[in-house]
Structure formats: structure tokens, C-alpha cells
Amino acid sequence: MIQHSSKTKNIIDYFNRKSIYNQLNMVIFNLLGRTDIPFSLNVGGSSYTDFKKIVVGLPEIFVEKSFSYEEIFSALKALTGHEAEHIKSSDYRVLKMFLKDGSEYLNEKFQIHQNHGMKIAKHVLNSVEDGRIEKRLCNRKKGYKKHIQFLNATLWKEQPIRKENELQDFLYSITSYSVTGLFPKDFEVHYKNTRMEKELNKIKTMTIKGINESTAQGCANRCMRIIEITAPYLAELLKDEANQMSVDDMSDYTQYTCENPDTTSSENPGNAISVHFKSEEENKDDSSQEQEQNEGDGNGILGDMKGEEGEPKQEERSGEANSTSESNEDSTEGEDSAKNEETQETQEGTEEESDVNNTSKQDDSTEDSNEDESKSNSISDDSIVENIIENVRKDAMKDAEFALKNAKKEEDKQKEESKKKAKIDKDVTKKEVNDVQEAYSDNKYGKQKPTLTISPITKRKRELTEDIKRDGKRFRKEIEEIFKNKKTYDSRHRRKGILDTSSIWKVGTKDYNVFLKKGQPQTTDYVAYMLVDGSGSMMDRVDENNNKVSCSQKACAVIEEGIKGFIPFKSTIFRASGRNVMHTTVSEFSNDSKFNESWNAYFEANGGNMDGFSIRIAIKELLQRPERNRLLVILSDGLPSAYPSQKLGQADVKDAVKEARKNGIKVVSICFGSKRHREETIDVYNDMYQKSVISCDPSDINKELTRVLKREITR
């Protein structure tokens, strides 16, 4: 088990709150328009998405150093946006094909082990693709630029290069350049005027073009050129056993496995805003002419790969002019490639020879310029990053603070609602139970004072059946229509009533019809409580597919579908064993769950029932409610059974029903069972309940319940 420090635990606890998750889920919704993508936080781990979920790994640096919650939230927002953009713009199919082609190329041409080649190719494409999607994200949603830049600048500042392994430093430099436009912090301290710097300078322009591609395939094509250009250097590095081991230790995980990128917005973002810390054009100007030579020679497998539109690129033929396919592709990227294309068309092979002759001269000039540049880059890059952090911090922190305040407001609101719900849903007090028990003093009804146990029901999640959906929808429509018809509007311009302040001006015109009569709003003043028999006889079968329990559960589910949101509704299963009465709460008055609580409950049936006592407890709960119209429905398949005699049970129920009606509660009894059972017991039911007794087949409970409720709220 992982042991976290108290500081780390505090950060995990703070950001693992539902309200924080809701703020980050809002990021996902704003970017993707979807609410079905779960979000989770992985402190110190990796970030990834598989299109079905997003996992955001908070870098350890934000836990180890003293970062504020606002700074951490800004980083999380950037990482969440990054992973969401992978879903929108990246394509796992392209990655798989790239890994296959790239590793095969490195293996066949340079004898690099295929597993090593695959990991290196994945790192290159992941790096450039990260730069591409972050640019696309910040051009679609410009408010994310400050968070992306704050995250990348912080990581650049806190994770300098240390010259521990040349191959890993080379790969890290590709990542850093792809997302920031800078080589890592302290790069010049360790690698100025080295082979690594020269190799990285060769791929600067191609990396910039990669992040400006409009599709994942276009980015992969650019990355293949990067692989081709750097392959000799990679092969040389991998001769060293330490470098081989470092590649073996590289993670196999993939940042994304999304295969359906959004192609509706495929514009090339090359001329749009950049998230790099240094101008992309300046970086292009800084790169040597050798970059253009490496980029345009076309002597690799790029010509065999499909372009971003899915069409094969033409191969170049030695001794002839280059095909215009790559030149055409590059022409949209900048002035240099347009000039190259024009030169190729007019001068054919002559310019090729000139380029080759100039290569050695250009190498020398590149080294000289790099030497001058490296003297200032360490300072200038540090200064650039500090300026970026200073410039974006205020807005990023303001945005993060606003989100965290919203999270706090949401929690405060939830606490308030929980208090209200607790007040609404509070069970009967001990005093109220004692009051009910007094009705059984002196062994009245042949019982000692009963005890009461209230417990929540066991829940599960399952889909509503089509018949419940259909009946519930129809019932809800009828309920809506009833309340719509009950609504009346304010009647103005009356001679008496409430003074209408908006009509006082009429008095000056000697029009004294300045009163109004308030209309009836479309609000309900009803509450319903359903007591459902949970005695052992409810297990009797109705047909080969249903027993009485399942019939009553379906009926409760339909009622819940129909009246949830209109009428507060509570349902409780009641049963008894000896003198202990058990109430199992299925659905509370305050239920606002998107799931159907009645259908998700495990209905159980055993023991007997003490209807009179359960009715009295329900009376106490209903009298706590503020609604004027209170309805109690008792759903039972038999007569009270937990009494010494049937007569005592009948007397208890009869007195309890009288008490309910005396307190203004409407009581309805639904008796169900076989035809013979109903015929034999209907007189007893009529005696106990006096009125509002409905006798039906178990399969008709649903229909009768909805009919009763409609009748009661129509009055």
C-alpha cells in the first residue's frame, strides 16, 4: 500500500472532492460537449485517455514544491484540456501505423532493435502531437492558453536537463521544444556546440511544421521525417549499453487510444496564435539551411506513407527534379518552402547540385551562429520563461480562484440541501414512537407495546423495463396536464382585490380599475406516502414470471416515474416479527435521483404485518410535512397477521385509519390477490377502511394506483 506524506494526502483529499471533479468535468463538457466521460485524478502518475474516460496525472513537482491550490488547479485544468483535445484531435490508428513503419525503418536501415525503435518513435510522435493538440486547443478556446503556458513554463523551470543520459536528454529536448519552442532548461550548459545540438537544430523546422498540421496523419508524416533525419544519430547512441537500458526502461503506456478525431475543423493553425514561448517564425529563422536540405530531400520512407488526406505521396527520382507533392504540402507553411518549390520548377537539377555543394559551408556557419546564440540562450530562455509565468499567472490564478470558489459554493449549497433533506426526511422521533406505543398500553389490541426498526433498503442499478418507461411516461403526462389545468393567471384591471402598483397611473385618468386577483401558480400542495406490504405471503406467484412482490415493485416504480418532481413521495415496506415492526425505506420524500429508487431496490418479503402500528407511524411522518393535501396508500395482499386474533388486528387498523382521517389525511387501501381471496376478504377491508377500498388483481395494481392518485389530485 502506497504511503503518502500528510502534505500529499491533503492535496489528494482537496482535489478528490466531488465539487472539484465537477469543475474539471465542466472543462471536458465545454471542450467536447459530452457529459459521459468520467474524470479521475492520478497524483504523481501519468495522464491518458481511451475516449471512454480521462485520467489526469498531476506531476509530482506540484506536490513536492510549495504550490498553491490555485496553481495546482490551473495545472489540472491544462492537463484536462490536453487530454480532452486528444479525444477531439488525435487518432490512435495513425499512431499504430506510425509505430509499425517507424520501427521497421529503424530496424531495416540502421539495425535498431524493433522494440527500441517503437519506443523512440512513440516518444517522438507523442511529443510533436502534444504540441499540435495544445496549439489547436488554445486556438479553439483561447482562455486555455494561460493555463497551458503556466503548466509548461513551470515544468520547464522545475525540470532542468542534468546530462545523466544523452539519449534520454535528446528525447526530452524534442518534447520540450515541441510544447514550448525552447530546449530544456540548462541545455546550453551541458550540450552547447555538441552533436546533439546540431541534430536538434536539423529538426526544428520539421517540428514546427508538425505542430501546425491540421490532422494527426499530417503530424505523423512530419514525425517520420524527424525519425529519418535523426536515425544515424540514434543508431550511434544505441550502440551504448547504458542507452539501450534507458530505452528498455521507457514506459510502454500510450497517452491516448482514440480513433475518431473530429474532422469538422481541419483548418491548418499555422498562422494562428502560438503557445510557444518563442516565436515560431523566429525559431524557423534560427534554424540553419541544413534543416531545409534535410526536410526537402525526400529520400526516406515518408514518400511511402499516406499524406494527411489519405493519398500516397509520389517518390522522388534521382537525377530528376523533386516531385511537387511535398513542396505543395509545405507551401502553405511559409515563404521558404514556396521559394524552394519555385526554384525546383525553374532550375530542376541544377539547384540540387548547388544545395549539396553549399552544405559543408552551411554547417560551418551554423556552428558559428550556434556558438554565439548559446552564450545568451541560457539567460534569455530563463528570462523568457520567467516573463511567461509572470504574464500569465495573474489571469490563470484569477480563473482558478473563480473555479475553486464555485466548488466551495457548490459544497455549501449541497450541505444546505442535505440539511433541508435531513429535515424533510427525518424519521419519527423517539417521542413520536412513544406516543404511538401508548395506543397499545394495557395490551390493547392484544399486543405489548411494539418496537420499531427503520432501515434503508439495499440498492442496485438496473435499467427500467420498457413497460415501466411507457406507463411512467404516460402517467407523468397525465399528471402534468392536471397541474397545468389547475394553474390560473393574475386577473388585472379589477375594481377590488390587491392593489396593482403597475396600474396606479390610471387613477390620473379617472380609471379606478387598479386592483388584481392573484392567480393559482402551477405548484403542487400534495404529498404521498405508500406503505407496501412486506409479509411472507407477498412471495406468492401471480404467474410464471411474477410474484406479488414484483407486481407491487413495478407499481411503485411507475408511480415514482410519474410524480417525481411534482409530488413529494415516500414508499416504505412494512412487516413484523413478534412485537418488532420493521420499516424499510425505499424512497424518501426528497428523492431527486435520476435513477428510479423503487426499481433499484431489493424488495424482500417475510414475517407478518401489523398494519395499524405502521399506519400510525406513517401518520406521524405525514403530519411533519408542510403540504396541505396528504395522501396515504396502503398496498397489501392480506389482512393484518401479527396479532393474537384477526378481530384485534381489524380493530387496530380501523382505529388507526380513523386517526389519519381525523388529521386530514386521505387514506386509500388497495387490496390485491386472487379473485377468491378478494371476495372472501372485501367485507373485512370495507369494515377496516370504511371507504376508498380498491380490490384488484395483482396485475392491475399499476393501473389502480395511477387512477387513485389522479383522482385525488384532480379534486
Image (tube, grey):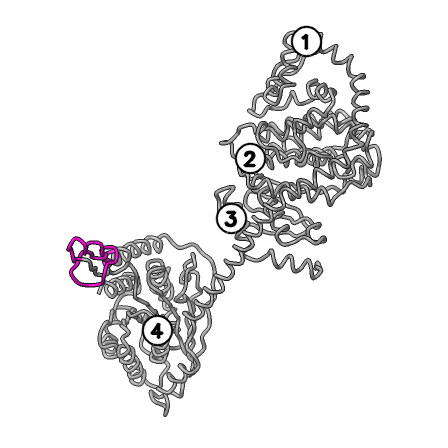
- The image quarter containing residue 639 is bottom left
- Up the image or down, 591 lies above or below 195; here it is below
Which residue occupies the extreme bottom position in the image? 442
Q: Residue drawn at (43%, 67%), measured in percent from left and top? A: 420
Instruction: Looking at the picture, tell me which residue is in the foreground, 579 or 520.
Output: 520
Which dot, 1 or 2, sits closer to the camera? Answer: 2
Which dot, 3 or 2, sits closer to the camera? Answer: 2
Is any part of residue 143 visible from this angle?
yes
Residue located beneath label 3 in the image: 26
Q: Amino acid at mark 3?
A: Met
- Give the residues in magenta: 484-513
Q: Are marks 4 and 3 in contact (CB under 8 Å)?
A: no
Residue located beneath label 2 in the image: 139
Q: Amino acid at mark 4?
A: Leu
**CA separation in Å, label 1 and label 2:** 41 Å
- Up the image or down, 387 lies above or below 404; here it is above
Q: Is residue 497 magenta?
A: yes
Q: Secondary structure beneath disc 1?
A: loop
Residue located beneath label 1 in the image: 320
Residue located beneath label 4 in the image: 622
- Sequence-first disc among 1 and 2: 2
Q: Is residue 651 magenta?
A: no
**Tag 1: Cα neighbours inside 10 Å, few (<14), some, or many (≥20)?**
few
Q: Residue drawn at (63%, 34%), measured in percent from left and top? A: 96
Is any part of residue 172 visible from this angle?
no
- Sequence-first disc among 1 and 4: 1
Image coordinates of residue 701 in percent, x first then y, are: 30, 64
Q: How many marks?
A: 4
